[in-house]
Amino acid sequence: MALEVFHKDETLQMRRKLIGQSCRLFFSHDPVKIMRARGQYLYDENGMQYLDCISNVQHVGHCHPSITQAAAAQMDLLYSNTRFLHDNIVLYANRLAATLPKKLCVFYFVNSGSEANDLALRLARQYTRHQDVIVLDYAYHGHLTSLIDISPYKFRKLEGQKEGVHVAPLPDTYHGIYREDHLDPGQAYADTVKSLIEEAHKKGRKISSFFAESLPSVGGQIIFPTGYCKRVAESVHEAGGVYVADEIQTGFGRVGSHFWAFQLQGEDFCPDIVTMGKPMGNGHPIACVATTEEIADAFTANGVEYFNTFGGNPVSCAIGLAVLDVIEKEDLRGNAVRVGGHLKQLLLQLQTKHPLVGDVRGVGLFIGMELVKDRVSRKPATEEAAHLVRRLKEERIVISTDGPWDSVIKFKPPMCFSIEDAERVSTCIDQILGETVPFLEYCLHRTAMEKYPAEEDQKTDTLSVINPSTYRKNNDTLCYLGHGNPTHSLGFMSIPQSRFISF
Amino acid sequence: MALEVFHKDETLQMRRKLIGQSCRLFFSHDPVKIMRARGQYLYDENGMQYLDCISNVQHVGHCHPSITQAAAAQMDLLYSNTRFLHDNIVLYANRLAATLPKKLCVFYFVNSGSEANDLALRLARQYTRHQDVIVLDYAYHGHLTSLIDISPYKFRKLEGQKEGVHVAPLPDTYHGIYREDHLDPGQAYADTVKSLIEEAHKKGRKISSFFAESLPSVGGQIIFPTGYCKRVAESVHEAGGVYVADEIQTGFGRVGSHFWAFQLQGEDFCPDIVTMGKPMGNGHPIACVATTEEIADAFTANGVEYFNTFGGNPVSCAIGLAVLDVIEKEDLRGNAVRVGGHLKQLLLQLQTKHPLVGDVRGVGLFIGMELVKDRVSRKPATEEAAHLVRRLKEERIVISTDGPWDSVIKFKPPMCFSIEDAERVSTCIDQILGETVPFLEYCLHRTAMEKYPAEEDQKTDTLSVINPSTYRKNNDTLCYLGHGNPTHSLGFMSIPQSRFISF
């Protein structure tokens, strides 16, 4: 067990002081301090184990010894840049090429998914000589200036939509304009992109690229309808643009049946650029852009060097190679098929039992369970989803929400997630959804929060410290039913003790 | 000795095929394959040792065992993201804070200098609510879309200067508009920034920031004149903007006397934002933005999360802490003062001997030696500098050029560079500059290149494979004076064998 340097409260205080507060914590009103992790399990400062359902970056499992060994061995030999020749970068590019359609055969290594998407933008614009970009609604493609511009999830909260960015409807057959009862939602949604291109052309604008995650994540764990990508690609190509598949969250076998999520759309679809990141290095900062010879040649032809200080260094590539080895040796794609399939079945059973569960969708270990107020209106059950996440944390299960209304419980665990883990989480969800008290309690807490707002308004987590069974409302006073000091239990809600009546 | 997977030729062939050709190699027509490195020494596939004068990223020396141990130990414990509480990030931020003026007390951790500069732009724009940026001529701030826009070194070769970007003269007292004989070049150059702001204001534009490396590197290893930064900061503040010091190449004690290069400008100057990168992780991808509480608060106030998947993770911070420890324990700042001072003295001696050496400037282990055709016109001796780099490579010394005309030999070695290393490189330069043959030969090769151009036009390295003593010109035919197959020796120049006369 690693030793804590600071007590948790002190760590939190120092973090509040030293780290930009735009960098948020999970469960921000009662954050978890994690000291070590292994496989799909996290351990806090008291050695308490949490089941991790969301760390898709730690793809082959937290702290896999093969990865650590490969990194340390290469760090002892060489950690220089790619202006010197080295075998690792070509070995790694070659291995990645083997997972992709033949035409995606040129690679650029970078340090993050954001760097990869920015480079994809540059490649697309250089190759097509066009500037405009089509993106899907609610999309998030990274934290850089250029990517916020093409991320409706972010730009709607910031400077707004820029000229030259065109937002297509999210092909969400549960909430979107065409639903599961439509005869051909793939065609219908692809037609919305075609129309968008036509409108752009009428304004004299030219499309450089269509950018989309192969399975929209922030959009709510969306699975594209059949035929969508191929038809979109046809329209985009016709307009002189390229198709960029953002596989940063979805690649490296997460979907199980295929190595890349775009391959779910069939062999007759191939993107022109693929960006990859998060799971590539199992935590280590490495990312990549794969593209065609033609696009790479156009980029070279501008005569300007592309130099990425750390991208493709021997250590990053050694780690990338080790990750690929573990995926194969431990048959993690097979595991994603088996465990993901089982988990989806278990969640579908919950859907038959709990009216709150509106939809269960996903493939492999990329699964979403959407909560709704009722199944007719499909009104998102945002607060209930937040409550479920909080309650699961009390049960030592780390999970979170996604989607436009934060109403989708997302599963993107390390790929070593087991059948037993799937059963544990589904049993816990079943129990929590069966509890009668929490929603009443939740409303009480909400009232308290409105009356005595927390210093920092981070709504989704504000109530996470409260054990619902220890409070009851008495007019406008919260009654404390537990032991000890209630203001302490309430963490950062700052409700003065005098407001409580203890029984 | 690590084993090669591929023969060097095969590695090169695979790299040409698999890696985007915009990613260039050092000595691209006869690249060096490096298998391992230690301290300031690189070793190729035959175990041949090279002295490394330019790897500023491998700050405390290549493959320092303390760094590898710290990385491996933390990788075995936890390599997760910063949404969980962890001690390392606050420990590291705290250590960095101790090196900076008090007001720079809030930190954001990212993966590369480019990510840091992009975030600095976002912070500056959010805080000031202004958009425009002032940069120095020839500056390079990173490979991202947003940074190419503010990097004259890049945008001049690409899309050109955008509205909202203002280019101030480089305060270069050797080549610039105000020189070493000016009474107060600091004031004079600062006034150029003031005028630029006034012009921008006349056009109704508003300045968000002044962006500058604390010692311009690509600009040619420039040392700012006294008082420059403070006066620029005054004008920029007056215009409602902030001063961003890009310390990506210059920080972490490289200048010896101070931890940050901006501190050379005196205690009455403090930037509003500092970006750091390259040397932070000794090769590992880590970078950072430090700023004031006011700027961080303005960024938080937009209500939008900043999430960087890998930035500030426990492994990156453990590595960062280990780097700081080695800088202290091995007194690398003291070494930079001693060895850098000695090297500068040796180069100044060469200046008294060789008319080609126009200027020697620098501080600590950040030194530039500028070559000129003659000392009156100060016309840059670009070809001679390229020749010197090639000849030094033959002497197993890795060095390169910088500056607007690639006429500045730059020294930015690992900080463990020794007095003996300094003497070795200066002795070699002395010998090479004393050679009479090479420039004649160089012209012959150049003629050959123009007649039979290489398939890839990478001018600076085209001739690097040629051993100058083995060729002589005979009318328009190159005469081969060496042994073996001349076309082979000529590498990628593709001059047919029939063009040669062997003696």
Image (cartoon, coloured by chain):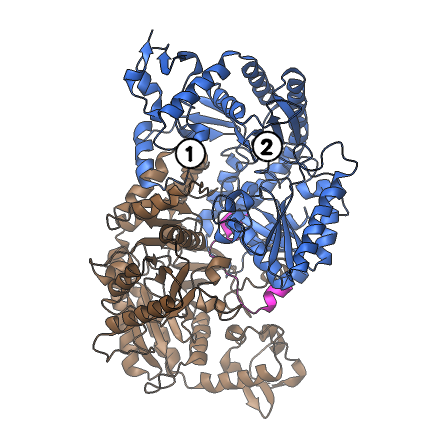
Chain colours: A brown, B blue
Q: Earlier in the sequence, mark 2 or mark 1?
A: 1
On the rendered structure, is A359 left or right of A184?
A: right
The label shown at residue B248 is none
Residue A44 can be seen in this image? yes
On the rendered structure, is A394 left or right of B103?
A: left
Q: Which residues are magenta?
A: B297-317
Which chain is indicated by disc 2? B
Tag 2: amino acid? Met
Q: Position of residue A85 (x, y in %)?
A: 39, 32
On the rendered structure, is B98 left or right of A205?
A: right
**Image quarter for residue A7?**
bottom right
Q: Position of residue A230 (x, y in %)?
A: 24, 62
Tag 1: amino acid? Leu
In reply to whether residue B316 is colored magenta, the answer given is yes
What quarter of the picture does the C terminus of chain A occupy? bottom right
The label shown at residue B25 is 1
The label shown at residue B415 is 2
Q: Position of residue B420 (x, y in %)?
A: 59, 20
Outermost residue toward the front in this view: B475
Q: Of helix, strand and loop, which one carries label 2?
A: loop
Which chain is indicated by disc 1? B
* Residue shown at the point (40%, 63%) measured from the top left: A205
Q: Position of residue B297 (x, y in %)?
A: 64, 64
